[in-house]
Image (tube, rainbow, N blue to C red):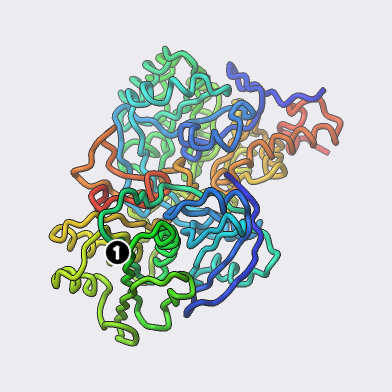
Amino acid sequence: MTTLSTVLGPLELSCPVLAASGTFGFGEEYSSMLDLSELGGVVVKGLTLEPRWGNPPPRVVETPAGMLNAIGLQNPGLEGFLEREMPRLRHCGTAVIVNINGETEEEFAVLARELSSVEGLAALELNVSCPNVPLGGITFGSSTPILQKLLKKVRPLCRLPLLVKLSPNVTDIAGLARVCRDEGADAVSLINTLKGMVIDTAAKTPLLGNKTGGLSGPAIRPVAVRMVYEVFQEVNIPIIGMGGIMSTEDALQFFMAGARAVAVGTANFVEPRIMPQIISGLRAYLEEEDLEDIGSVIGAAHRET
Amino acid sequence: MQAEAIVRKLEKVAEDIIYLKLEEKSIAQLALPGQFLHIRIGRGVAPLLRRPFSIAGASPEEKAFSILFRVSGEGTRLMSGLRPGDRMDCLGPLGRGFHTAPLKGAALMVAGGIGIAPLLFLAQHLLGAGHKLVFFYGAPSAGEMVCLERFLFNGAETWLATEDGSAGRRGTVVDLLEGFFLEGRISGSVFACGPRPMLKALQEKNEQWKMPLKFSLEERMACGVGACQGCVVASSPDFMGWGARQYHRVCLEGPVFDAGEVLL
């Protein structure tokens, strides 16, 4: 009997495929099209302490084999989330991970502290990599001293498994992952979107309301796989890999690069049932290869042949 | 819901505008005027995202429905090469359509260009229910107009406007409609779809006309089901209800809005 269960420090998942933050709302929109309990977990839409209205439209635009988004963290805030979303999420049958965002260290700290006592959450994902907000976001994830200071404040307050979502818009991602490990984070999520721009040549202006946006989709997959490979090689910390996964084959690349779990984002928009499809594909792969668990694939690309 | 529809017919009905008839039983049964389909083009990664199309008509008896599209980019160029028998992966019907009952007076349909699509479907419903209907249809030129008689067998009173004067009155469709209102020739509920500047003009003029006005909006879309918050439109300052949301999702709260709900 093969198993897809995976362990990221204190976080145990029955299946290594998660829905990536921002692409799956609070799980409700897709619940009529797939059974959430089939998934390893859902990382819900980025949450801030206070409600956020997000950026002016247009917020999305397609690009070659990808898309740019600049939603700007539109969300109902902590109170709205706990009142309106959490009662349903608690019974959705899968691990619920909350992606948290702050403009200040204090906001992150309050969110971590408050959410730690909420029943029914599996983990928190510290978002230090949003490219679409003027304050906070990527600022916290671009320099090792700033990230270190944030983690020193947040980690002791967070009683749930703590993941840190890192940005590819940096020169040394392994250095940032090392800070996460040293400060007690349980895993890193690699990668958030790459900052990009599309210009509307007729209007002679950037197309997105926010001017810039985050690039996702298959276009960024090789960058993401390389970063997972690099962090796996240099830092001993569990990795959740993501970036343009659209098939079982794509997911396997991330596992072989060293990810212990993967997240699917943009592909959900294209094919709402893509995650269950990838999960059955992984099961079939393990059976074909006569492997007992997904663990035997993790990091396979690093082994000497 | 997600379903594979089969291409039945592809026909050029105006300059760069193609009528596509598809067969899929459930969609044909469920579709309501104003709703849209989120269609995947091909199976590859370019084009990547689905494209939203207003439903232009549906017939449960024929198990068929139709869309209109303008060939304007890579996705629609590929679609123009579809052949009968080809399959299309459709998500839908999605979104909130036109809620029409109860109607006071005539239904005044105001369409700009390809925006005629959802109004053809609405007209099909309203004519079937015996409503009086008047069409106001504008486009840059006559060549870019879809022939209404082709879609509406019962016929409907139709007034045209073109920017170059090649059909109907020269000018915009909003100016045309305004003429009717100023002369007191007409009143009723207004249903509109077209380019954003047209809808904005209509919304502004309606401050004086004070007619019930609903319009269908178009916005760049990713998921189509409300998850990504990509396709938003600002809510009007008077409409800060639940959660004081400042944006509505066009895919979920729309694509049809009351004129008072949104700030264009």
Q: Quadrant of residue B44?
A: bottom right
Residue A65: in sight, yes or no? Answer: no
Q: Residue at x 43, y 18 (%)?
A: A155
Residue extending furthest toward the bottom: B166
Residue B168 in the image: above or below residue A137: below
Look at mark 1 in the image and give the residue it sits on: B108
Image location of residue B160, percent across then percent down: 32, 78
Locate residue A29 relative to residue B245 in the image: left or right. Answer: right
Please give left or right for residue A247 compared with residue A263 in the image.
right
Please give the name of the residue rendered at 33% of the width and 26% of the height, measured from the top-left corner.
A80
Tag 1 subunit: B
- Rendered location of residue A200, percent (x, y): 38, 66
Q: Which quarter of the rendering shows the N terminus of chain B? A: top right
Residue B253: quarter of image: top left
**Amino acid found under the numbered disc labelled 1:** Leu
Res B203 quadrant in image: bottom left
Instruction: Say left or right for B177 vs B56.
Output: left
- Residue B148 in view: yes
Q: Secondary structure at mark 1?
A: strand
Locate residue A54, reporting x and y percent.
33, 42
For the residue pair B126 and A183, the one nearer the viewer reads as B126
Q: Residue at x 35, y 62 (%)?
A: B193
Q: Is residue A161 above or below residue B251?
A: above
* Residue A5: x %, y % from top left: 69, 23
**Crowd class of label 1 (few under 14; some 14 to 19; many from 20; radius 10 Å):** many
Q: Quadrant of the C terminus of chain B?
A: bottom left
In percent of the image, x 58 and y 29: which residue is there?
A: A36
**Is B54 rendered above or below residue A215?**
below
Closer to us: A151 or A69: A69
